[in-house]
Image: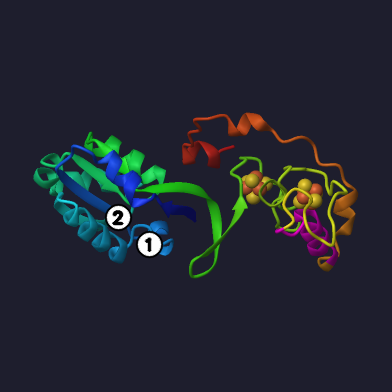
Amino acid sequence: MIITRQKPIDDILKCLDGIEKVFIVGCTQCATICKTGGEEEVKSMRQVLEGKGKKVTAAEVWDTPCNLLEVKKRFRDGKDAISGSGAVLVMSCGDGAHTVCAGTGMNVVPANDTLFLGQSERAGRFNEVCALCGDCTLFMTGGYCPNALCPKGLQNGPCGGAKDGKCEVNPEIDCGWLLIYNRLKDAGKLDNMKKIMPPKDHSRSIRPRRIIVDAVRKR
Ligand code: SF4
Ligand code: SF4
């Protein structure tokens, strides 16, 4: 899932400076789990903005504001309220904010910072697990990602600097390559540690990327 964190309210208000009417959009998916754009947060944002003298034209939680078709449909259904607003405050990830902008042509203000692709460990705790490299090698590393778990992004680790199992770059985290080693050991695949992984194919992560699913399936 995509992990987001709400911007400080003062920053949001600065972005809305001079804008009287605001349409608020949340997201039922990742932003709801991150508590940055679910029903509760949208309602609370409405109260804050109204308390600051803004007129909130509507405060809705959309299924997937990152889906252009969904956004266009919502725009058709609520065109008057949306178009009559000075901005849409989007409480989702950056993808949602971008898509709302593309699907409505409105002035969009993101309420959240989009941080990383992560795993929900439990309520309110998220771990980064994938750096979206486009060239997945988890089959070699026991399912743990060296790009996400090793601050140096080493494809062939460890670097040798770990102390008491902790990373030399950030002693607050476990050495990602020690985790990989232990996972491979448990799986009886320690031989993988001796295999040299080739450099990442960075051409797969040149931005912006675009995927047409039918074409991928035929590869
Ligand atoms: S190897 Fe690449 S695609 Fe696979 S989990 Fe790591 S960053 Fe993500
Ligand atoms: S100590 Fe481990 S996680 Fe930290 S940089 Fe070295 S190999 Fe990577």
The disc at residue 32 is: 1
Secondary element at tag 2? strand
Q: Position of residue 76 (x, y in %)?
A: 15, 44
User: Residue 16's image quarter?
Assistant: top left
Query: How many tags in the picture?
Result: 2
User: Is residue 153 positioned above or below 183 on the image?
Assistant: above
Taking the magenta stretch, the answer to whether it contains residue 116 is: no
Residue 198 appears in the picture as rendered? yes
User: Residue 36's image quarter?
Assistant: bottom left
| Tag 1: amino acid | Thr
Number of residues whose C-alpha sits closer than 10 Å to that of mark 1, classed few (under 14), some (14–19) or many (20 or more): many
Residue at point 75%, 58% (across, down): 142
Secondary element at tag 1? helix
In this image, 100 relative to 132: left or right?
Answer: left
Q: Nearer the viewer, residue 218 or 148?
A: 148
In this image, 169 relative to 162: left or right?
Answer: left
Q: Position of residue 82 (x, y in %)?
A: 15, 44
Residue at point 51%, 36% (across, down): 215
The disc at residue 133 is: none
| Tag 2: amino acid | Gly
Residue 67 appears in the picture as rendered? no
Q: Position of residue 190 (x, y in %)?
A: 88, 58
Quadrant (top left/top right/bottom left/bottom right) for the C terminus: top right
In this image, 26 relative to 2: left or right?
Answer: left
Q: Nearer the viewer, residue 49 or 40?
A: 49
Q: Which residue is mark 2?
A: 26
Residue at point 24%, 35% (across, down): 107
